[in-house]
Image (cartoon, rainbow, N blue to C red):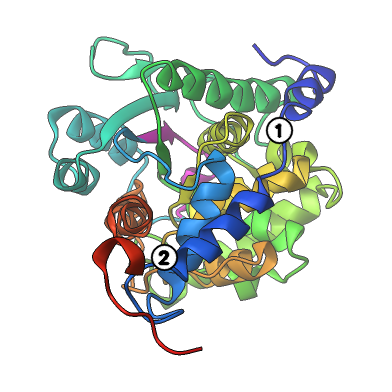
Amino acid sequence: MIKTREQLQEFISTIGPVDLSIAAEVERLHGQLTKPDGSLGRLEAIGAQIAAIKGNTRPEWEKKCAIVMVADHGVAAEGVSAYPQSVTIQMLSNFSLGGAAINVFARCVGCRLRIVDVGTNSTDESNLSIKYRRVSCGTQNILYGPAMTIYQALTAIGIGIETFLEEHKLGIDIFATGDMGIANTTASSAITAVTCNRNPSEVTGPGSGLNKEGLQKKIKVIEHALQVNLPDRNDPIDILRKVGGFEIGAIAGTILAAAAHRVPIILDGFISGAAALIATSLAPQCRNYLIAAHLSTEPGHGTILESLGLRPLLNLDLRLGEGTGALLAMPIIEAACRVLSEMATFESAKISQKLS
């Protein structure tokens, strides 16, 4: 369990660079495959990135895993969401019964799905299909003070690390992030505003469907929360503890753990992006392990991707979360990898190459 900054830094020190020599080999391999140079566009770069992460020009792709972190937020009491806080628990049950969009998409792409309660406003732990690792029963209301203590922030990150390591023992070739938590776009907007040095009005959207009046109220709540808490832009743990969420911290932990084990990370939307800001601020080397699945309609998500230097694969006007965008991108990334192991070369297919 991560309990101190020193323990977290010790874990972060295990994250190594991707293998750029492997990426160069893949680029050469693409020049030998039965197609014009560059004709597969971004798929060629994706394949090279995956190969560089895994240190293999023919990366394996069989074992897919998505982890959905679920938690509640005290700031939900301020009416910053179109849905009441009770929906978080209701959706947790829906996940367990296989009825949510993420369940449908996981079945579509053959992805193992793990649901983790990292901090819902409940004491029930009776559902055997849910992994219960609550830091607390929701965060505190950031309108009046910090969302959590430093210890809780580190614990949330540690839970993310431990959950990934447990799943890694079962095998993970590719990993997708996911989230659920009423009011978590408020926390994500606050994190984005601080980390990317933007005004809350620039990075705050309607979330689950606020009207214009509701959106303005949400922006004012975030502005006030930042004035009350004064998070340190240069300290990601301080940002997380003052205006973040337990699921955001836990997702950041899974990103750190996946990078440490050389597993490619498919980022979902806005909440996962906020977690990536925390993770990459702690460990900049994580950046090369990230693939942006899609561009959310939440305005802050574009800001995050620009800050991380990531280009999304899809633009489907998604804003659901759960990991849905990440799973929709999986077949595209799989295709980029399978080309490397299954496509014929000019020589093996006895096809004349173009004149140089």
Whether residue 143 is visible: no
Query: In which quadrant of the rendered image does the N terminus lie?
Result: top right
- Between 163 and 40, the one lying in front of the other is 40
Spot occupied by residue 255 in the image (x, y as percentages of width and height): 57, 38
Q: Quadrant of residue 7?
A: top right
Residue 169 belongs to magenta span: no
Spot occupied by residue 264 in the image (x, y as percentages of width and height): 50, 44
Q: Amino acid at mark 2?
A: His
Q: Is residue 195 left or right of residue 265?
A: right
Which residue is farthest bottom?
355
Which residue position is annotated with label 1?
15
Q: Which residues are magenta?
A: 66-79
Which residue position is annotated with label 2?
294
Under circle 1, the secondary element is loop
Identified at 73% across, 70% down, the residue is 198
Identified at 29% across, 36% down, the residue is 62
Identified at 67% across, 30% down, the residue is 148
Q: Earlier in the sequence, mark 1 or mark 2?
A: 1
- Between 342 and 43, the one lying in front of the other is 342
Q: Quadrant of residue 249?
A: top right
CA distance separating discs 1 and 2: 25 Å
